[in-house]
Image (spheres, rainbow, N blue to C red):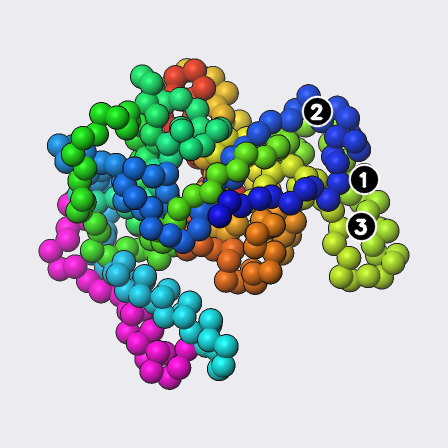
Amino acid sequence: MSRTTPPRPLDVEALFPELSAYRGTTTRLHPRPGRPDVAASSVGGPLLWPTNEPWPMCTEPHSHARGRRPADIRRERQILASAWLREANPGPTEGERQLLEQLGQKHRVQEAATTDPLPLIGLAQLCRRDIPDLPAGPDDCDLLQVFWCPFDAHGPTGYSMLLDLRWRRSWEVTEVQTSPPQPQVVGFEGYVPEPCVLYPEQVATYPFAGLLPEDLCVRIDAWEEALEEEAEELADDDAAVVGYQYDLSIPPGWRVGGFASWHTTDPSPMNCRTCSTPMHLLLTIDSSEWDGGSGSWKPLEEQDLPTHRSATPTEVTVGRWGELNIFACPEEPDHPHRWSIQ
């Protein structure tokens, strides 16, 4: 089944015609639970990784001897999902609560030293044939594979994430690694994705308001304030006030290409550290597909599904329920990527 974004509540270009010059596209990935095969674009699925190539490892020295077992995390999710689906007496039973308490315990890997390489988690793979806004990789590569370390223990602060993005030519992989190494424990359950198939959909998008010309941004702000004042005068607490940020410009959820949102921090220049070229948004990894403020983007096929059961299909959590924007150099795609958490 495809996923279809509803028409926008308002025609933003009719309100602000000059926005037509800034219109772009982004591909919403719409990951949903499933069983992707090794050649498919997916989140949390098996990767097209050759047997003769070492699996990506985190080699930065840091503690990774204590955490939760990935199998326990997935089992916990299954129990909770089934428990809340019960029509009669929803929620975990007493026996399930005891099991959930056991599954939530942390374990220690006695032989793990801080200097030992740690297998990265395969987060996603994206193929150009499936995703319109995925740019070409270096040397005609058509497949992007995304990995991350399951511990926040990197960088100058010692509390940052570690990403590893790999491009490859899919047709060159003849023998696929079927049992790649996995971390025995993880530092945070949000790093463990659930297997999801993708339903890519290309939609129109517009830049974050703070990056538009100042006079246009001021007019958008004034328009939004007028709508809010009108809603207050009507004293209708249930009235949904349409906003540029949450309804008309940048869709929530996992997506490729388009514009980054800067709703948590001020916009920050993202220039390539190798050649100083302004970088383009490559991929957004989001903690949820929509929320209370962005519900207008909920696919038409899922309008009747409750948010708490359908908005977090990947079970991935970025930071404090945020999103991760990954940027790539448009001139040389093999230059190091940059990212920002919002």
In percent of width and height, residue 255 lies at: 49, 38
Residue highlighted by disc 1: 223
Q: Which of marks 3 and 2 is in front?
A: 2
User: Upstream in the sequence, badge 3 or badge 1?
Assistant: 1
User: From mark 3 to mark 1, how far is it between C-alphas?
Assistant: 9 Å
Circle 2: element type: helix
Which amino acid is tagged 3? Glu
Image: 113 above or below 141: below
Q: Does the magenta stretch include residue 77?
A: no
Q: Give the range drawn in magenta.
A: 92-116
Residue under the image location 75 percent in, 36 percent down: 11
Q: Which of 67 and 30 is in front in this view?
A: 30
Residue highlighted by disc 2: 20
Q: Which of 1 and 243 is in front in this view?
A: 1
The reply to whether dot 1 and dot 2 touch (C-beta < 8 Å) is no
Which amino acid is tagged 1? Trp
Image: 323 above or below 77: above
User: From mark 1 to mark 2, how far is it between C-alphas?
Assistant: 18 Å
Q: Residue 154 falls in which quadrant of the image?
A: top left
User: Upstream in the sequence, badge 1 or badge 2?
Assistant: 2
Q: Nearer the viewer, mark 1 or mark 2?
A: 2
Q: Residue 94 falls in which quadrant of the image?
A: bottom left
User: From mark 3 to mark 2, how far is it between C-alphas?
Assistant: 25 Å
Decide if residue 111 is on the left or right side of residue 25. Answer: left
In percent of width and height, residue 82 lies at: 41, 70
Residue highlighted by disc 3: 228
